[in-house]
Amino acid sequence: MATKSKKTPSYDLKAADRRRNLMIQIGLTAIVVIFAVGLVLYIVMNGQTKSTAGETKSVRVASSKLITKEGSSDPKVVLSMYEDFLCPHCGAFEAQFGPTIKNLIDSGAVAADYYMVAILDRPQNQNYPSRAGGAAYCVADEDTTPNKEVFSRFHAALFAQQPSETATSYPTDDQLIETARQAGASGSVPDCISSGKYVDLSSGLAAATGIQSTPTVKINGEDYQFSTPDALVAKVKEIVGEVPGLTTAPPAAIPPAGAAPTAP
Amino acid sequence: MTVAATSETPPAESPGAPQPGRVRTTSALWVLIAGVVGLVAAITLTVEKILLLADPNYVPSCSINPVLSCGSVMITPQASAFGFPNSLIGIVAFTVVVVTGVLAVAKVRLPQWYWYGLAAGTLLGAVFVHWLIFQSLYRIGALCPYCMVVWTVTIPLVVVVLSIALRPLAGNAFARFLYQWRWSLVALWFTALILMILERFWNYWSTLI
């Protein structure tokens, strides 16, 4: 608005008029803006709570030697891991802790619950995280081996072959099916992967479980800040006591391709 | 607003349109500042692009997280819509805007046809920017901070330049209405864009809270 006034009283009157008009204009604009923001936030947050109410599902991997709470079949230690198959930190976590976690499971010290969350879904990665996560649920569904060996192999293979976050192409569903086949999956797994049965579950799982970052590790439901495999073993031993055959495994037992998941 | 002006001067058609050919200082400053900010952003983008070409492993300074990342945006075909990096257009175009801003601030009277030309140019720029906004949000799925700086200055710039260039329409009631409400319209426009970004990447933003 022009401000070349303050010459004569008549101009001052006009200036007051103009100021009032300006206030009305700002006020109306603010009302419309606040209304629009409120409406959109309401819609978005509602969509959010819908997926919060979504199903949660984990894959439990445990051995027959599992140490249970006295007088029940519940495991003494449940190690929950929330991982996104595309997240580089999850790849690094698997490379560093994977062998030790396998030892923990095999010795019966822990039961491992895997949550295949997908927080890095993007159009440019063709939603690889939720497709890979969904595929892992498909493999676990059909896995009848006692220790979920097929699932474990598929899980390890996906991290070993982890694509970069900025890659230009990502594994297709057919390639996921092939990886599953190599891990030993059969039956209805290909159908399950290509129909995307668990893709929505995986993409909504982070919200449903309240996970804010990956990898998240919980021990008996409590957040655990992992540092080294030794510290993890020590923490588990605090709860279950000494376990025969339980040692820390050297990291990077996974081939070098997976050992450097952050390399672009 | 159209109170009959009872002063000695001829009735002012519209508060923002004084003598023809003369540009108000605030408008001139707007043009200058928008030009400088846009030019800096375009140069930064070009430099980052060159660094990225020289070293494919280079992580641009604006790649903050999966959503705010110019690296993944800069390698897309949309970032070179005409076969060369878009930021080169930005360097040329914003230089013209800066020069115009300097001339306007210095109260150099520019012919009306010059403002028509600049209005046409900034209008094309705004159309291009909105195409890029759409591509960035719904096709690429990432935001590039420096590009957003360009979006942010282009939208007010087109409004300011249009209101300078279209002063001959000051007698038109509809044009005057648009002129009076132009900043409200800009505010609503920005609100819509911000809400679109919020909605589009809500899954990611909500993990940060």
Image (cartoon, rainbow, N blue to C red):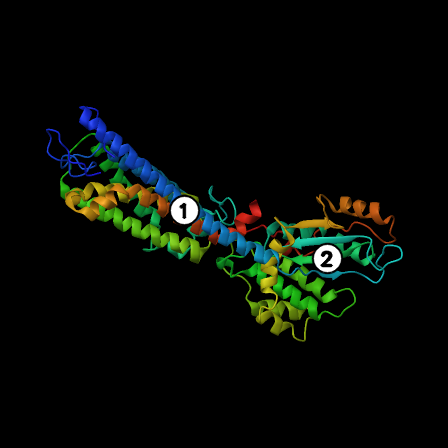
Query: Can you give x and y, in whole percent of width and height, for residue A8 in the image?
Result: 17, 24
Query: Can you give x and y, in whole percent of width and height, for residue A130 in the image?
Result: 58, 61
Query: Is A159 on the left-hand or right-hand side of B101?
Result: right
Instruction: Tell me the quarter of the picture where residue B170 sits.
Output: top left
Crowding at mark 1 (Cα within 10 Å: few <14, some 14-19, many 20+): many
SS at circle 2: strand
Quadrant where the image shows the N terminus of chain B: top left
Give residue B49's mark: 1
Tell me whether marks 1 and 2 sit on the same chain. no
Residue B50 in view, yes or no: no
Separation of marks 1 and 2 at Cα, in angstroms: 44 Å
Determine whether label 1 and label 2 are within 8 Å by CB: no
Query: Can you give x and y, in whole percent of width and height, for residue A171 in the image?
Result: 55, 64
Crowding at mark 2 (Cα within 10 Å: few <14, some 14-19, many 20+): many
Kindly identify which chain the residue marked by label 1 belongs to.
B
Q: Which residue is mark 2?
A: A113
Residue A249 in view, yes or no: yes
Q: Which amino acid lies under the numbered mark 1 shown in the image of this protein?
A: Lys
Query: Can you give x and y, in whole percent of width and height, for residue A146 in the image?
Result: 79, 67
The number of callouts visible is: 2
Kindly identify which chain the residue marked by label 2 belongs to.
A
Q: Is residue B185 above or below residue A1?
A: below
Q: Nearer the viewer, residue A11 or A87?
A: A11
Quadrant where the image shows the C terminus of chain B: top right
Query: Is B133 on the left-hand or right-hand side of A132?
Result: left
Q: Which amino acid lies under the numbered mark 2 shown in the image of this protein?
A: Asp
Instruction: Tell me the quarter of the picture where residue B23 sits.
Output: top left
